[in-house]
Image (cartoon, grey):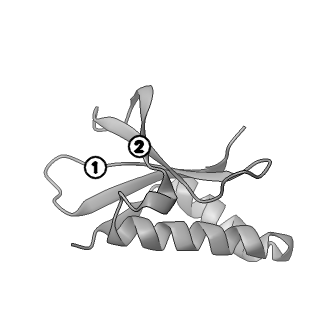
Amino acid sequence: MAFRLLYYPTALAELNRLSLDGSLKDREKAVKKALAHLERDPRHPGLHTHKLKGQLCPHEGDVWQAYAENKRAGAYRITFCYPPGEANTIHVIDIMMHP
């Protein structure tokens, strides 16, 4: 079952920044690959998807995080949630570097 990804402005802004900055092409490729996996299967083993403790999405549900990169300084992460009443939809809240 495929999911429809809807992006919050913060996620879209970072995705656009990655695509415009030529020095970040490898990171853009990793993020887009992770988004494709998320769209097909949020439990894909390469995403290392896990629930973030103590954070609620704007819909007051759980917030999840997926890895776009791993074992790299400033590795990119994708935070998302499943909005209630929107079957097969994932809201991508943010795309960011892991501190």
Determine the image quadrant of residue 1: bottom left
Residue 93 image position (x, y, % from top left): 46, 49
Element type where label 2 sits in the image: strand
View extreme (top): residue: 54
Q: Nearer the viewer, residue 20 or 51?
A: 51
Identified by mark 2, the residue type is Trp
* Residue at (79% x, 69% y) in the render: 24
View extreme (right): residue:
23
Report, in whole angstroms, how far the alpha carbon at label 2 lies from the one at label 1: 9 Å
Residue 40: x and y in percent read 34, 72
Q: Secondary structure at mark 1?
A: loop
Q: Residue at x 21, y 63 (%)?
A: 88
Q: Total of numbered circles in the picture?
A: 2
Instruction: Pick the quarter of the image with the C terminus.
Output: top right
Q: Earlier in the sequence, mark 2 or mark 1?
A: 2
Residue 55 sits in which quadrant? top left
Identify residue type, mark 1: Tyr
Where 16 sits versus 91, above or below? below
User: x%, y% of residue 46?
Assistant: 50, 61
Q: Residue at x 43, y 42 (%)?
A: 50
**Image location (x, y in percent) of residue 80:** 42, 49
Give the residue pinned by disc 2: 64
Residue 27 versus residue 10 in the image, above or below: below
- Looking at the rendered image, the disc whose residue lies closer to the viewer, 2 or 1, is 2
Labelled pair 2, 1 in contact (Cβ < 8 Å) = yes
Q: Is residue 12 above or below residue 50?
A: below
Question: Residue at horizontal 40%, vertical 62%?
Answer: 44
* Residue on which the image places disc 1: 82
